[in-house]
Image (cartoon, rainbow, N blue to C red):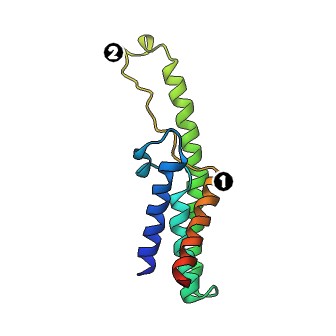
Amino acid sequence: MSILNISLFSLFMAQFMKIFTERPFDFRRIVGSGGMPSSHASFVSTLSTMVALKYGFDSDLFAIVTVFSLIIIYDASGVRRSVGKQANVLNHLIKNLDIEHINKKPNKIKADLKELVGHTPFEVLAGAGLGIIIALTYYYL
């Protein structure tokens, strides 16, 4: 199996695990963003670990993959989490607005922004750990 295939397997495993780690139990979580564990972190951690094991920790390829992996993990935990918090605030504001005075048409504005977008640090750590374990398991078996 290629490095990409193992990384994609890790991504799908993380998404599948979300069904069982999130409450209430919901099969739609398998395709959603956010939640436990981070599939972004799992995907790029598997990729980085597999590249390190195949090409060496001192290779240029590992350096490149690691930099991009860190950017993706930062985005999953930092930027996207902030977006989720902002969506929560906006949804709350819109639900409590007196829309009749703002619009001629009532209920024109809907409070339905997606709030579960980013990850907590623990969710990212769990995803990264899962990715490393999957990479090491595949490499040594």
Task: Please give the name of the residue rendered at 59% of the width and 44% of the height, measured from the top-left corner.
Answer: 82
Task: Please give the name of the residue rendered at 44% of the width and 68% of the height, measured from the top-left corner.
Answer: 9
Image quadrant in which the N terminus is located: bottom left
Given residues 19 and 111, the one toward you in this image is: 19
Task: Please give the name of the residue rendered at 54% of the width and 87% of the height, measured from the top-left corner.
Answer: 54
The residue beneath circle 1 is 121
In percent of width and height, residue 138 lies at 51, 79
Residue 68 seen by the camera: no
Residue placed farthest to the top in the image?
A: 101
Q: Between disc 1 and disc 2, whose residue precedes?
A: 2
In percent of width and height, residue 135 lies at 54, 76
Given residues 120 and 14, the one toward you in this image is: 14
Mark 1–mark 2 distance (CA, rounded to whole Å): 42 Å
Left or right of 94 on screen, residue 5: left
Mark 1: which secondary structure? helix
Mark 2, residues whose alpha carbon is within 10 Å: few (<14), some, or many (≥20)? few
Whether residue 20 is situated above or below residue 115 in the rendered picture:
below
Amino acid type at circle 1 is Pro
- Corner quadrant of residue 42: bottom right
Amino acid type at circle 2 is Lys
Whether residue 115 is situated above or below residue 34 in the rendered picture:
above
Whether residue 78 is situated above or below residue 84 in the rendered picture:
below
Mark 2: which secondary structure? loop
In percent of width and height, residue 34 lies at 52, 49
The residue beneath circle 2 is 105
Residue 15 seen by the camera: yes
Label 1 vs label 2, nearer the camera: 1
Mark 1, residues whose alpha carbon is within 10 Å: few (<14), some, or many (≥20)? some
